[in-house]
Amino acid sequence: MSTFHAVVWMDHSEAHVVMFDREHAEAQRIKSRSHHKHQGKAEDLAPFFAEIAQALTGTREVLLAGPGLVRNQFRDWVAKHHAALADVVVDSVAADHPTDAQLVAMARQYFKKFDTMATDPSVA
């Protein structure tokens, strides 16, 4: 699915990647295979991060969400290994465990505000 926006909710054990446009949303769950889920070892999470990055191919704006630091570890990993994807990650926000529908609603609200702020006020 080729979409403009994506939101990724993640913790050390799984990621919910939701690609969406105005009418559609498509969710994918990616499980971590790391045996060190709570030790914060980014090198152990590299295959997990690579799978998430692959799922985000072609998306133009990505919002990261989750309850812990893994979303920031992912952003740092992407900056080192996938420069093009790093350029489209717009933010990383704390979020507990929303349903996919709640996640999309949160992301739609975020991107609506983000898109409004990104417009040039001199072109009114």
Image (cartoon, rainbow, N blue to C red):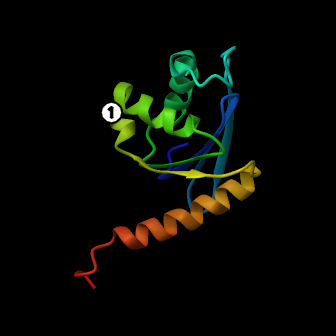
Residue 74: give x, y in percent of width and height.
50, 33
Residue at x 54% of width, y 48% of height = 6
Q: Is residue 91 placed above or below 58 in the rendered structure?
A: below
Q: Residues within 10 Å of mark 1 (few under 14, many from 20)?
A: few
Residue at x 28% of width, y 80% of height = 121
Residue 1: give x, y in percent of width and height.
56, 42
- Would you identify the image quadrant in which residue 8 lies? top right
Give the amino acid at mark 1.
Answer: Ala
Residue at x 57% of width, y 34% of height = 70
Q: Count up the numbered dots.
A: 1
- On screen, residue 121 versus residue 47, left or right, reads left
Q: Residue furthest front?
A: 39
Residue 20: give x, y in percent of width and height.
58, 53
Residue at x 44% of width, y 65% of height = 114
Question: In this figure, which residue is indicated by the disc labeled 1?
Answer: 83
Q: Nearer the viewer, residue 55 or 13?
A: 13
| Quadrant position of the C terminus in the picture | bottom left
- Would you identify the image quadrant in which residue 84 lies? top left
Q: Residue furthest bottom?
A: 124
Q: Nearer the viewer, residue 104 or 70?
A: 70
- Would you identify the image quadrant in which residue 33 lies? top right
Q: Nearer the viewer, residue 26 or 124?
A: 124
Secondary structure found at label 1: helix
- On screen, residue 33 versus residue 88, left or right, reads right
Residue 107: give x, y in percent of width and height.
59, 58
